[in-house]
Image (cartoon, rainbow, N blue to C red):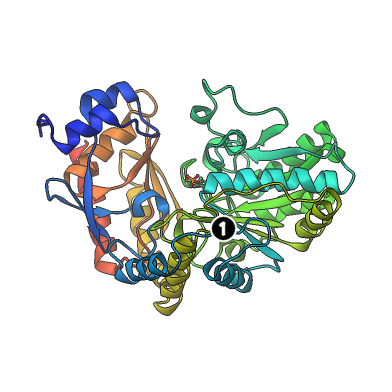
Amino acid sequence: MPVQPNSIEARDKAYQLHSYTNARALERDGSLVIDRGEGVYVYDNNGRKYIEAMAGLWSVAVGFGENRLVEAAARQMAKLPYYHTFTARSHGPSIELAEKLIQMAPVPMSKAYFTNSGSEANDTAMKMVWYRSNALGKPEKKKIISRVKGYHGVTIASASLTGLPNNHRSFDLPLPGVFHTTCPHYRVYKAEGETEAAFAARCAKDLEDLILKEGPETVAAFIGEPVMGAGGVIVPPAGYWEAIQKVLKKYDVLFIADEVICGFGRTGRMFATETFSLEPDIITLSKQISSSYQPISALLINEKVYGPLADESAKIGTFGHGVTAAGHPVAAAVALENIAIIEERDLVGNVRALAPKFQSRLKALESHPLAVEARGIGLIGALELKPRDGFAAGQLGPKLLAIMMEKGLISRAIGDSLALCPPMIIDEAQVDTVFDIFEASLEAFQ
Ligand code: PLP
């Protein structure tokens, strides 16, 4: 549809720089302006309806238009629209949310600490790890290991942890002291003739080799998403996490589980830490914590992290970290209500109930002549397209996405993979609709 002068689309092009765009292409082509949402659907500025099969950015667990969250925000706005948790100040919603998260934590955790985004949570995790090493009198123990294709955010530290070239190129990143080990994507990174079990063991061996090369006394922490999201929805092979954690324990390396996507039910358990039997020292959370109705993120830290941190703060006088809006009362109130909805409606049970259908319909697409691999767990997945003559790598995904959008389905192109991560309130008929449109789009792309 041509863009009318002074339309909202034209004003978007004129005034707003978007994240993750080719800015010149956006000046030319414009963007899709979403106007409102209801359940698993969003409507654009021209009234067209889409099934939002990415839950926004992997985040709107309870769906769009959830009035309980609106009311929770309004109640808190009226009562106390802002307060902070710096120094010896606090407020009810942050206290209640911290208590709730510690009670929900899948492994024993000592404290919750609030930030505003996943990036800030991971940035803070890195700073806490450094602070702790200094507290323990091990100033040389500062290196952090992440993974190729891991996604941990975009601040200078969290973008360094991210293992994707687009987050480093032209930004002069990653920072020194951050290393990326093997990505656990079996199909892509396996050696000739290597079984899945052997590949999982080799990933752990690669990590061990890197720790030994750098010197275990210099490696402080490892960060990983239980299931990689923005790197293309990569579910590690069986045995991977067990083998990785063995290495981390052997060399006294802390484990940060980035549950920014997985947390609050996505993999079929409340936390992927449970799904994969993880024992993290730090868990970072965001997105589904509030269904992203309000920006909020959290770190859960265990005693190994909290103890030295608390001691150091006593020694030097302060834990000199914190952002103005962290644990914002309105965001915390919305998060509490959102978690209540997830629990009351048993949305994690809904994920488990629908996962077999969701995953089997996704798997069925793998045999399509245009596809090369289907990947997923719970209510998250991706279909990767086969390289095709006449298309450079990364061109097929956006082309198929454009066809899907024409047919009323919002997915996300990650290179040539199309990701799905629908709101956890989705029902069986809507899952079928998602895959019916996906299939029809593949047919139309022949
Ligand atoms: N960690 C993971 C696993 C993510 O998927 C994301 C965002 O997609 C982040 C961290 C960064 O979160 P934010 O965009 O809120 O900074």
Position in image of residue 415 (x %, y %)? 40, 34
Q: Which quadrant: the C terminus?
A: top left
Q: Position of residue 250 (x, y in %)?
A: 84, 50
Circle 1 SS class: loop
Residue at 24% in and 27% down: 14
- Residue at 83 percent across and 55 percent down: it is 314
Coordinates of residue 37 in the picture (x, y in percent)? 24, 57
Considering depth in this image, is 290 or 78 the residue closer to the camera?
Answer: 78
Q: How many marks?
A: 1
Location of the N terminus by quadrant is top left
The x, y position of residue 143, in whole percent, is 76, 37
Could you tell whether 34 is left or right of 91 in the image? left
Name the residue located 35 percent from the left edge and 67 percent from the top edge. 74
Q: Is residue 167 above or below residue 344?
A: above
Amino acid of disc 1: His
Residue sitting at the far bottom: 344
Q: Is residue 324 left or right of residue 398?
A: right
Q: Can you identify the residue that label 1 sits on?
A: 84
Point 54% across, 23% down: residue: 171
Q: Residue 189's quadrant in the figure?
A: top right
Q: Is residue 437 left or right of residue 391?
A: left
Asked which quadrant contains residue 401, the reply is top left
Query: Dot 1 surroundings within 10 Å: few (below 14), some, or many (20 or more)?
Result: some
Question: Does residue 240 show up?
Answer: no
